[in-house]
Amino acid sequence: MTYEPSTMNTIRSHFPILSQTVNGKPLVYFDNGATAQKPQVVIDAINELHSSLNGNIHRGIHYMAEQCTERYEAARETVRAYINAAKSHEVIFTAGTTAGINLVAFSFGEKYVTAGDEIITTEMEHHSNVVPWQMLCNRKGATLKVLPFADSGELRVDLLSSLISPKTKLVTVTQISNVLGTINPIAEIVKIAHARHIPVLVDGAQGAQHGGVDVQQTGCDFYVFSGHKIYGPTGIGVLYAKEKLLEEMPPYQGGGDMVKTVSFAKTTYADLPYKFEAGTANYIGAIGLGAAISFINSLNKKELRKQEQTLLQHATAQLRAIDGINIYGNASNKAGLVSFSMERIHHLDVAQILDKLGVAVRSGTLCAEPVMQHYGLTGMVRASFAFYNTIEEINVWVEGLKRVKSMM
Ligand code: PMP
């Protein structure tokens, strides 16, 4: 199947949820940054497993267990190819971005971080890429340093070198800000950190949705993302890490499937990737994620990106034409989302009125309080677009905003 941008209905017809009405109005779904909707092939893959093929992986030798195992490992290979990892055992299935970052913060932290060390994060991170590092620093007596961003929404990469010290153990940065939309120059950041022999973790929660990544080309040491943001199921995600690091890092959780032998005297751990996949894995989620990636691969990626940029440009121009709207994040390299505030109108009121009109947007701190603090705000409204959104939907949303303004 190939995607033809001229026939938006073709792409939308793969997503059954999009054709419903909400509050009596046709749904306009602009909360793709929080979670993206699922194509029928993903829904079907999950249904098929639950209705006719469910068997726990890596254990039973019966037909269904073997089928699920095979498909689970095939999904790992699909993920490997999607992010261009060198080896499939560098792909660890997790519960999501948050789970992946916590895994690294604990396991990498246990191995390499001691009192007095430093971790560098940035001012534009989601809480998921702040709190696990704060917890690690508190445990170890280490310090969390913060690379700031400019008011334009661009990261001050020029300051990174001076922030790095002999005590720095890791740099962690988002590929795309979930508030500002900024697409960060990951390869450049990796280059600066690697020049000082410091590994880099990239939070790909938004990046995996808007364009993906080539982990070998960027050179990052860790890359994490969530299935539900790239049209796959919830409760599944991926941690990519370089083999050498994964070999050196201790397991994060203990349990079934992550061991070779167990006795009360001594336990030996399984090889990669299983060392980091304790307990029954979310194999149905992983297979669903594989189906989502195969769906994305069947589309014309260039056209998808073009569509998102068209939506972004139209949305930005429309917002700029309304008095009293402030847009946050005007980076020259920006993904398809717009965060904004309306003067003298609370962000929750905006989202609530839009909801009555069938338009789903996000409001609040967007899980990024430091970004709110940067602008002195308590919250924003965010519209985040996916390739299945349309110009017509943006027009409905903009009319809704005009109505909010006149009502309030
Ligand atoms: N990082 C970023 C940049 C995000 O946008 C999100 C989700 N909003 C997360 C991390 C956390 O993802 P999850 O809740 O799927 O673990």
Image: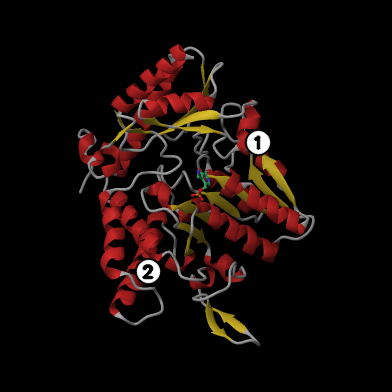
Q: Would you say residue 261 is visible in this rendering?
A: yes
Residue shown at 33%/23% (left/top)? Answer: 396
Label disc, if present, on residue 299 of the rendered structure: none
Disc 1/disc 2 C-alpha distance (Å):
40 Å
For numbered disc 2, what is the local secondary structure?
helix
For numbered disc 1, what is the local secondary structure?
loop
The x, y position of residue 244, in whole percent, is: 56, 67
Residue shown at 62%/36% (left/top)? Answer: 369
Q: Would you say residue 313 is visible in this rendering?
A: no
The amino acid marked with disc number 2 is Glu
Foreground of the two, 321 or 172: 321
- Check the image and report above or below for 53 versus 8: below
Task: Look at mark 1 in the image and give the residue it sits on.
Answer: 148
Task: Look at mark 2 in the image and give the residue it sits on.
Answer: 73
Residue shown at 21%/38% (left/top)? Answer: 4
Q: Residues within 10 Å of mark 2 (few under 14, many from 20)?
A: some
Q: Is residue 354 left or right of residue 62?
A: right
The x, y position of residue 336, in whole percent, is: 41, 34
Cβ of mark 2 under 8 Å from ligand 1: the answer is no
Residue shown at 49%/48% (left/top)? Answer: 204
Q: Indicate which disc, 1 or 2, sits on the residue closer to the N terminus.
A: 2
The x, y position of residue 163, in whole percent, is: 71, 43
Foreground of the two, 385 or 118: 385
